[in-house]
Amino acid sequence: MKSLKTLVCSLIAVILLSCSSSTTNNQDYQNLSEAEMFELAQQIAQSTIIVDGHVDLPYRMWVDESTHQQEILNVAERTEGGDYDYPRSKEGGLDAPFMSIYIPSRYQETGGAKMLADSLIQMTKSIATTWPEKFAMAYSPQDIQNNFENGKISLPLGMENGAPIEGDIENLGYFYDQGIRYITLTHGKDNLIGDSSYDTTYIHGGLSEFGVLVIKEMNRLGIMVDISHVSDATFYDVMEISKVPVIASHSSARHFTPGFERNMDDEMIKKLGDKGGVIMINFGGNFIDQSFDEKNKNVNEHIVNWLAENDFKRSDREAKAYIEKYVEENNPFPSVEKVADHIDHVRDLAGIDHIGLGSDFDGVGDTLPTGLKDVSMYPNLIAELLKRGYSKEDIEKICYQNIFRVWNKVIAFSEAT
């Protein structure tokens, strides 16, 4: 029996056909009022599969458990704090957040990376087993499609940092069997696979010899290669070695953040597009706005000084009221328009077929843009794209079709080898 959402989606699709166009410059949308535009954006969010390439819920849950919380964080209900839970996911139309199995770089030195990865994977799977009417695991685009039709949120798995491989190529097969479907090769430090964009040592000058073997084995197994976090040299090595398109699961355009190597420059974005890949735009403030860090620093310094001068704590009622008012009047956060600027830039460089969404929700702290503060707010971004002339077909590509295409190509290559 089809879910209510599926039936509603079918009705919405009929409505949307009357104002949809296959061209990017959709004049019908431009004639809509602000309210009508947002209503259409909400309809598209609910009727279209939305895949987010990177949500850090598992590590958020693990940190909660490490403080001796007695039960698994109940993300089936609205939670205090954090960016992700089931009600907000449904409100925003998010159907498939890639759950980030995030391994901090310190585990490369202290050991235990594989053990932590196993813990986070099992914790994520426990969400699906604890609330099976709301969540389901997903190991392929078809799984996501099936779960969507049944009204469930999919939980695909991506591993952030290849450290849990621990120098043993056999562990790639182990993690594939555990459900990992992409691996971010590095994180904050160079590792056994290659060099990181955040490090300055550049031990390998790109991929290591072991890293070359890792890419080939990921291709063979059907694990997507994720080049977010890697150095430029590592990126270009991956482009030469991988036989299938790769992804940047949560990166943005360096054009707007000069000197921030964690983002991708124009030539890298073009190369990624030429090879059929997808860059999934990160929403974090310092990823999308060069001036965010300085603005945020100034606001925080003012608040700290004001608290000291008035002998207040942040938890005091008067202090909370003052801080809320001051931040509202001196908002350091970028806007949803900034995220759309990055999407425009990638479209102009590589084309509409090479853009996705990789928010980094629950991973970038209190840096998210006004209008994109949690997973309930995807319609705000869709509305902005509609204003800029993106068609429903364009938005569907950004929301899921582009990442599905890459993922299916990776699967097909694996099955053929």
Image (cartoon, rainbow, N blue to C red):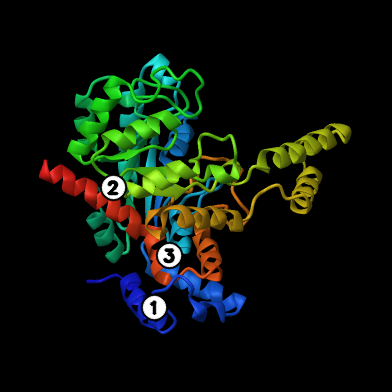
Question: Which image quarter holds the N terminus?
Answer: bottom left
* Residue wearing tag 3: 395
Q: CA distance from mark 3 to mark 2?
A: 32 Å
State whether residue 356 appears in this view: yes
Residue 147 falls left or right of residue 254:
left
Instruction: Specify the label residue 257 is tagged with.
Output: none
Q: Residue at x 36, y 82 (%)?
A: 14
Which of 77 and 276 lies nearest the eye of the viewer? 276
Evaluate whether residue 134 shows in this view: no
Q: Quadrant of residue 233?
A: top left
Q: Indicate the position of residue 274 as horizontal and vertical percent values.
A: 35, 48
The residue at which mark 1 appears reads as 12
Question: Disc 2 on helix, strand or loop?
Answer: helix
Q: Position of residue 340 (x, y in %)?
A: 54, 58
Q: Nearer the viewer, residue 194 or 68?
A: 194
- First reached walking from the N terminus: tag 2 or tag 1: 1
- Whole-angstrom CA distance, mark 2 to mark 1, is 31 Å
In the rendered structure, find residue 129 and report the number of the disc placed on it.
Answer: 2
